Amino acid sequence: MPRDAPVTIAPFLTCAIVFSPCCVAVRSASTRERMGCASPFFQCIVAISIMRLTQLRQADLNLLVVFAVLAEERSVSRSASRLALSQPAVSRSLQRLRDMFRDDLLIRTASGYEPTPKGQRMLSELSAILPRLDRMLAGAEFDPTEENATFRIAVTDNAAQVITPTLCRTVLPKSKRVTFQFLAWHDGSLEELEHGRLDLALNADDGHAPERFHREVIYDDEFVCIVSKDSPHTKRITLKQYANGLHIGIGILGGRQTIPEQRLLALGYQRTCVIEVPYFVAAMRCIPGTELIATVPKRLMAGEPHNPRVKVLEPPPELTGFRYLMIWHPRVHTDAAHTWLRSAIRETCTFRG
């Protein structure tokens, strides 16, 4: 064969299927018709699935529990006492494990059993798998002190400023095995939620979340207007003053701070944004020494240090408050880990201190 000739694996797969005993049923015409596909590729997938299921049926999963205890106790006698088994039974289980995985897994040393490299890898995997299996079988709640989990959450600048500082102080200290990844909200966040690339989304109730998602109000907020200290505006801005002013916009979704725009358009007004930034904090820091108006959530503003160079004004009464939502996909609605996640976010939002 020439060195640069293309290589295809299809003939080898076909050959493996034809001579594989576990695929005899798939080779029959009637079976292929029932499955709706007779391609060698499809037959290969079926063969692989059958082999994997055969391995699981032949395995005694209780042996994995014995291995985990042995690796932790490093003693047959202590493991036997903990498992309520005899010492010979634990020793036999260890031998069966070695035969199953074709590795010693645990080696006797002067200080007790020590895992081999493969045994160490198995132990790392089992530390995550066994608690999940136990919870699945028992219908138990998710335990963030025992189970490893990483949650990916899309947030706007507002939620990141309001929620994450409190979460670090209240939730993380008692969730030793949980990792949170907060990601910036963007136009494709809901699509990522749809396809399971995100676990949760936090966003203002701007009307963009599809009805098929579950949602819950986690807090209510309202707007305030930030202007320079030397601005002629005092205490409150009227709707006319607001509409005629120059604004700094915050691009959250589709290049627009959607809720103020929606409220104004419903009243027949439109504001002029001469500059747009992606973050509320950046907008507030642009205000001193300018004629600009920044419209920001009150909760977010309350968490910022006092800036003597700006004034905080009440917005036009027509620019009413808004709700902040937690949004998730129906497929994770009853999952114990996701139920815990939503509970943790609620705790963060209701915490005061």
Image (spheres, helix red, strand yellow):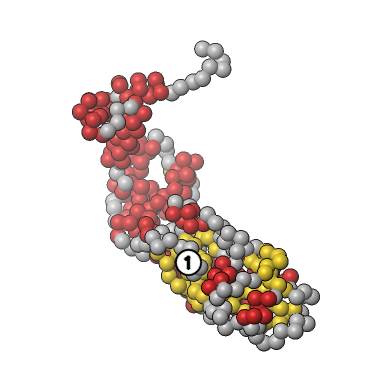
113 in relation to 169, above or below: above
Which residue lies at the image location 60% right of the left edge and 73% below the top edge? Answer: 269
Percent x, y for residue 10?
40, 23
Q: Position of residue 294 (x, y in %)?
A: 67, 73
Q: Residue at x 43, y 70 (%)?
A: 216
Q: Quadrant of residue 335?
A: bottom left
- Name the residue type under label 1: Gly
Q: Position of residue 251 (x, y in %)?
A: 62, 63
On the image, the x and y values in percent for residue 74 come to 43, 51
Residue 175 visible from this viewpoint: no
Viewed as shown, does residue 62 lie left or right of 191? left
As drawn, the residue found furthest toward the bottom would be 235
Q: Which residue lies under the disc numbered 1?
A: 207
Q: With 146 as the anchor, is 88 left or right in this view? A: left
41 horizontally vs 3: left or right: left
Task: Residue 27: tell me if it is visible.
Answer: yes
Residue 242 in the image: above or below residue 31: below
The residue sitting at 65% across, 67% down in the picture is 249
Residue 176 vertical position relative to residue 222 in the rendered view, above or below? above
Write down the quadrant of residue 286 in the picture.
Answer: bottom right
Quarter location, residue 283: bottom right
Residue placed furthest toward the top: 1
Regarding mark 1 in the picture, which secondary structure is present there? Answer: loop
